[in-house]
Image (cartoon, rainbow, N blue to C red):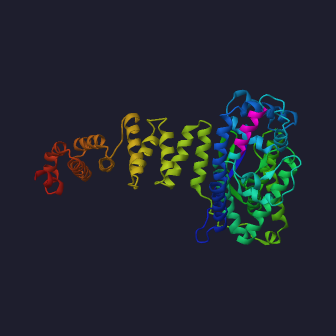
Amino acid sequence: MFYAIPLESKPTWRNPPWLTLLLILVNVAIFFGPQRTQEKAEQRATAYYLSTPLADWELPPFVTHLEQTGSRFAKQAREVLRRGEQRGELVQLMHTERKFETRLRADKVILADDPRHDEWKALRADYERMLPAPFTDRWSLDFADGAAPQPLTWLTSAFLHASASHLIGNMVFLFLFGFTVELALGRATYLGFYVLGALGASAMAMWAYGGRGGYGLGASGAIAALMAMYALIYKLRRIRFFYQFFFYFNYITAPALILLPIWMVNEFVQHVTGHTGVGYMTHLGGLLTGTLLMLLWPAARRSKPVVAPVAPPDPFHDHVERATQFSARLQFDRAAVEWAAAARLRPEDQPTLRAFFNTARLHPSSNAFHRAAKQIFRLKDGSEAAVEFQHESYKVYLDQAKPSVRLKPRDMGRLAVRFARGGHMDDARRLCQALLSSAPDDGATVEALTMVASCEWHAGQREQALNWLPQLQKLAPAHPVTRMLVA
């Protein structure tokens, strides 16, 4: 299993990828419209089916049929039947096996002289009356042996999906690759190539899976065509990708064109190693179609390699990539150095600060740990999420810093103010006490005391607020909060 997701280009909303967004909207509308309506009706019918003896009478001979006909689903179906779980999947699969359904209705499975025949016939009729008019099956690729050619389904199947996760995964990849290709080719050419990519993927699927039973659906074939177009648009330009290989994932900067043969080999290997349930040859067909379209398109040979603004090399990403690599090798000291460099470039980027802090805390006596904490405590972002991040980091720092914490009065005062506003009153009070002991004359001390006292007063904690009055009368007698407490 191999995935590669481009991270380099970003959509420009001055020229939005409207067509890509429209394609996503159409896929979503079809899935949550007619497909979901049919699915709910089928679920009700399947629940009725499983509550009757039909499942015990029909599913065992159906699995035997799959084994005798060499179906690619036979092994999986036998396992489902053996476990007795998820039998609804077998019921759905049975609808795609026309030969078995024909034999079933012709009384060649439950024979006419079988004592169960009359009861079976009545239950079967009730079940079939509950089944909805087919929509997904009607517009999907039909891989049944002897199925009549339906050229229109080569396109319509690219707008259908088997589940919400199937839809979401495909739409994410459609957006990631589609917006760049749309801006590069223009909307008219992009739409034409998307349709041709879907048709080419379906043609490969029919060649590879025709006669093997089941249905084919999903936008992944057309999206694979977009992936090939993306690689040929950028050619040898180095693009930053996120990739996953089985359980390993990382970032890589590589020429875009190198990924095209990797994608192709991955799909072919997945196909020949016997994986079922995923149309790998459909993906391969899309990759080949997208490649052919770009090679034959005259404008492609005249176009510039850079079709969308490509940002100059960003040292921030280089530091993050190296930090990730060092962490994967358990070289945390070197990783902390790279995270520190990244944090200097983007001092307000909270994910980077979190990674820097969590890496440096492995050595709590190191200067890196104290620097990471200081950068977090000095965040300008005053949002609730930022304050929670600061409070969480503060507790860790307070507990682990060696030989002791290194907090300047202005940092302590800023944290006390933010903690008071965020409802972390205990820690805000402790910071105020520390300020009174270490820096009573610092302006940060007055700011912290007045904020904590004000928050306590308005929260109904009048007695606790009045405890600060002696210090406030000494340090800031004219302050509005002091006058409020005196009154």
Q: Is residue 6 visible?
A: no
Seen at 62% across and 43% down, the residue is: 325
Q: Is residue 260 magenta?
A: no
Q: Is residue 123 magenta?
A: yes
Q: Quadrant of residue 88?
A: top right
Seen at 87% across and 33% down, the residue is: 68
Q: Residue 282 versus residue 455: which sits nearer the camera?
A: 282
Q: Is residue 54 visible?
A: yes
Dominant secondary-structure state across the stretch colored magenta: helix
Q: Residue 24 versus residue 417: which sits nearer the camera?
A: 24
Residue 21 % position (x, y): 63, 63
Residue 90 % position (x, y): 73, 37
Number of numbered labels in the structure image: 0
In which quadrant of the rendered image does the N terminus lie? top right
Residue 173 % position (x, y): 67, 55
Seen at 75% across and 63% down, the residue is: 194
Residue 123 % position (x, y): 71, 37
Q: Residue 82 versus residue 161: which sits nearer the camera?
A: 82
In the image, the segment drawn in magenta is 117-128
Residue at the right extreme, as displayed: 146
